[in-house]
Image (cartoon, rainbow, N blue to C red):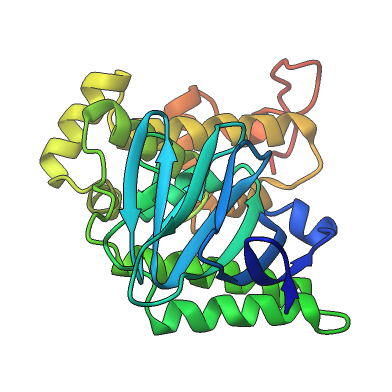
Amino acid sequence: MLESAFEYYEAWRNVPGPLETTAGMWLVRAGHNIAKPSYLSGPKIIESYSLHFIVQGKVRLEYGGETVVLAKHNLFCLWPNVSYSYRIEPSASPLRMMWLVLDGPQLPALLERIGIGPGQPFSTASPFDASARAIVNNIHRTLHMPHGDPLARQLLLYMLFDRLAKKTSRPPEPDRHNGDWVNQALAYFRLHYTEPLSIGEAARLAGVHRSHFTAMFQRETGESPQQFVLRLRMEKATALLKEGALSVGEIALSVGYADLYSFSRAYKKYAGHPPSDLRKNGGRLALESGGE
């Protein structure tokens, strides 16, 4: 280990490659330390998220005019561009910490899952158990091993947040406000409308009863879930028919129908004419001799 005026430490830096920077988060640097009695860091700001895990001893964290003393199994996170300071707190055991400095757009949501936010950048729920510590050790190994695998490192980072979230005493509660789950349902239908869909399954994912789901969806959107999905399918089918690259049978299967007959019947009922009448012709209907 290296020695400074305040600690003994090891640290490793990462240069994230494309596999990492196209993900939701990536590792910038990592390390661990044994603090000396005079240990102090800050006040200072950093440009990334610095997640600190307390292995033993105690640390005093000062942030935004607040102070908290944290102990073994607790953790805290320095938020980007926010001034913090932390120092050793007298304890029977020397202060030892591990840390991961992370960046990426997914981190606020991941940290929220473990009960950490800008207003409370720490967790006293003791989520940093032996399993979480083993994961951090493995992340460290991907940095100090020659040619450490970035894919393995990404998997370990997500495993760590999953483990911490399961151990926290403040798991995130799903928001059941109408606007929230209706928007979630809209996204679900837009993503899966070409597949066999069940309104019951959509209601289950939204966390509400099917009858309530249907009534509130219609009130918020002006359409029933079935009407919304039908419109998505018909709009996509119309676009494909105008392009003219696929047969009507191919289009039927592509927009979620089991066969040509059921699609043709649904399309005629929706549009007022058979799908075979519509071909690429400046967006106009063109009647074809011989049909499809």
Q: Where on the picture, by quarter, is residue 64?
A: top left
Pick the residue in front: 167 or 248.
167
Q: Which residue is drawn at 59% across and 54% down?
A: 253
Q: Where is residue 123 in the image (x, y as percent from the top left)?
A: 33, 55
Asked if residue 44 lies left or right of residue 125, the reply is right
Pick the residue in front: 108 or 181.
108
Above or below, 55 against 15 in this view is: below
Above or below, 242 against 261 in this view is: above
Pick the residue in front: 57 or 264.
57
Q: Where is residue 184 in the image (x, y as percent from the top left)?
A: 37, 38
Q: Where on the picture, by quarter, is residue 286?
A: top right
Asked if residue 120 lies left or right of residue 30, the reply is left
Query: Could one spot residue 262 in this view of the protein?
Result: no
Query: Could one spot residue 195 in this view of the protein?
Result: yes
Report the quarter where the C terminus lies: top right
Q: Residue at x 57, y 29 (%)?
A: 235
Asked if residue 209 lies left or right of residue 100, the reply is left
Q: Residue at x 54, y 79 (%)?
A: 135
Q: Position of residue 92 (x, y in %)?
A: 33, 76
Pick the residue in front: 218 or 279.
218
Above or below, 149 against 181 in this view is: below
Asked if residue 236 lies left or right of residue 290, the reply is left
Q: Position of residue 231 (x, y in %)?
A: 46, 30
Q: Where on the picture, by quarter, is residue 72?
A: bottom left
Above or below, 233 against 77 in this view is: above
Report the quarter where the N terminus lies: bottom right
